Image (cartoon, rainbow, N blue to C red):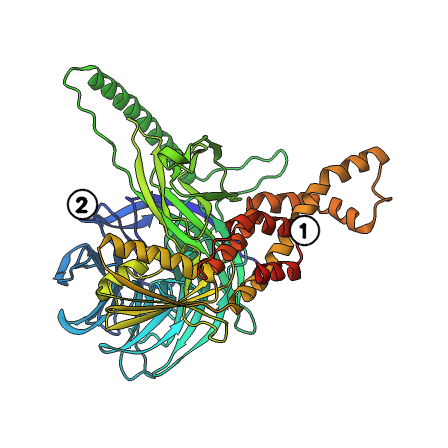
Amino acid sequence: MEIHLNRVDYMQVGVTSQKTMRLLPSLGKKATQKVAVADHDGILTCFGMKKGETVPVFKTLPGPKISRMDLGGAAGTPQEKIFVCSGSQVRGFTKKGKQFLTFEANLTESINAMHVSGADLFVCASYIYNHYCDCKDQDYYLSGDKINDLICLSSENLTCPFPVLACQDRVLRVLQGSELAYDIEVPGPPSVLELNSKDGGNVYSVSTGEEILYGTTNGKIGLVQIGEHSAAVKWEIDNDKKKGGILCIDTYDIIGDGVRDVLVGRDDGTVEVYGMDSSNEPTLRFEHVLSESVTSIQGGCVGKEAYDEILTATYTGWITGLTTEPQKAEAGPGDEVKMSKETQSKVEALRAELEQLQVKVLQGREQYHQTSQSSTAVSAVPVFSINDKFTLCQDDASYSLTLEVQTAIDNLLLQSDVPIDLLDVDKNSAVVSFSECDSEPNGNFLLATYRCQANTTRLELKVRSIEGQYGTLQAYVTPRLQPKTCQVRQYQIKPLSLHQRTHSIDQDRPMNRLSLVGQFSFAEIHSWVVFCLPEVPEKTPAGESITFYFNNTFLGTQLEATYCKGEGHFKSDNISTISILSDVLSKEATKRKINLNISYDINDDSVSHTLRMIHPKLEYQLLLARKVQLIDALKELQVHEGNADFLIPEYRNILDESANLLEEYKKQPAHLERLYGMITDLFIDKFKFKGQNVKTKVSSLLEILDNYDMNSLLAFFTEA
């Protein structure tokens, strides 16, 4: 079934956080609903629509940044009480704006997730979960990794409420009281949870079933059915088109077939509607792209009675609807489109408002100019918010850097003191220019400037690092504001930057071992592991010891890290990983004047195993490079002969695919050199552990790689 939705912009508030816009329950079937939205200025705004115009219901005074919002109420009644959290405080408001609750959760960190169910309040800070009933402490849980969101299930089939935590380590943790009942692995760090049984705010009961929708930071969506002792994954949607991460989900029958559809908002501005097919599997039915990240999404009826719509809130505070109501009339040749009186009055009001704004801008400019000329002028630096994300992408072993600013970006300067490659991003329309930099005295390996087009508020970049070389990537963001100002964001490139957390590894692989023994605490060795590896929680884990598993996203090699007070054990099927860990951990211990006893157990079989893992990538890149080298010569031959019929099929195929081959080669700069570097490091590291320096033989190794043959390479590693 086709679905046509038209965009309507309602209003703009301040910068918004995830899940801070909700629709209040409607008073009748298909009646318009009020909208409640909270922003970083601490203002809670509630508005409705009347004759096509936004009508304010109430607006609170500014205060601390509001990080979450939820609706609540007694069981069996409309869920129309509005709850917001700022810092560690939760406040409750009636639908008319009267404050009836101020509750201090007494948490040392700010609340970043909240769920309200009847008299129960569930809140989470970074690692801590708390449950309060009638504002009295009930349950407490300390999570092993950062909590991104929470939801609570309660139904006739469950004996008690089951809170579910979405944790950064790719796990949904299901709690029972203050204890962990069980956990569920999901295919990415879960960023948002939503019940699969509510409909656009029209929830009249807290009995909400047992199904949970989740979205991940790498753009995947799934449905999980929660039971008392286990869970079942009902379906998952992969992110094949490499869209943005999921920030918000809702369920609402926007298509009108009697079945709730899944509404999804992503951090690249994409809004999606998934309908259910005959086999109850989700199918993409509608897609619309906004210019900034979608922080909240709701299905309901806002603009006009009887017309369903999808309401979204974006990062910079735009409240936008995608409505089923037709927004324009089409006329044939020679016909005139007659505007209704309502539309005419709207246009006139907008024109008048525009003229007033233009006058205000002129007055403001003149006033600023006069002030800047006076001797008592004081320069005030404009404050602006930046929403940034630096994440490892498993698919292409690169880091995605996303920067979103509440005003238009003028330019961005990237500076790195560690060698990194910048990769092409299709969505990025900014013009990039590189500056020459001298790495020796200044430690500069990259200086790149991105000049943005007008009204660009979001920029996405991709970089790829080299394992073993670590440092800092800095982004200097300059918006189109006067006076000129700039903000700096720093991102750590870690020694084992291409490793990603996983939940298990293949224990049958040939493993190399590194063991450390010394007078260090559990917190100290944990801080070293945090320094070396991404996706490790900064908080020291509970208990006396911990084991983490990692997967190298570029090569597929694995790492196991087990450590406790005074002892650390690391296992990997890649000698270079062990070598990097050994060097960095020794350096960190030396800084703290801690004496380490280091021992190794090197497995020679692991070298051939790693080379076999590199083989398909190396073979593919060598073939791609050879094809690209032939393209110009083949094109000259084609021009000279007038056609390509005389060429053998292999060369004709290269000509036919030349555009795709060049594009792929351009997207993977220095890919071949990187593989050469990994093999060279592997060769040096193998003999380093045997006490031999083989750097003089590297030139012979590179000759073998230029005339690559797997058996010759294996023989060289064995005989050297």
Question: Which numbered dot is residue 62?
Answer: 2
Between discs 1 and 2, the one toward the N terminus: 2
The residues bearing labels 1 and 2 have C-alpha atoms spaced at a distance of 68 Å
Camera-near label (1 vs 2) is 1
449 or 66, nearer to the observer: 449
| Residue 379 figure quarter | top left
Amino acid type for the residue under numbered disc 2: Pro
Point out residue 387 in the picture as x, y percentages from the top left corner.
33, 46
Which residue is labeled 1 in the image?
707
Point out residue 212 in the picture as x, y percentages from the top left corner.
38, 71
Amino acid type for the residue under numbered disc 1: Asn
172 or 563, nearer to the observer: 563
Disc 1 on helix, strand or loop? loop
In this image, 180 relative to 555: left or right? left
Q: How crowded is mark 2: few (under 14 residues within 10 Å), some or many (20 or more)?
A: few
Q: In which quarter of the image is the C terminus?
A: bottom right
Up the image or down, 115 lies above or below 68; here it is below
Question: Number of marks in the image?
Answer: 2
Point out residue 39 in the picture as x, y percentages from the top left corner.
26, 48
Disc 2 on helix, strand or loop? loop
Q: Which residue is drawn at 61% across and 55% down?
A: 618
Q: Which residue is drawn at 41% across and 36% down?
A: 439
Point out residue 158 in the picture as x, y percentages from the top left corner.
32, 82
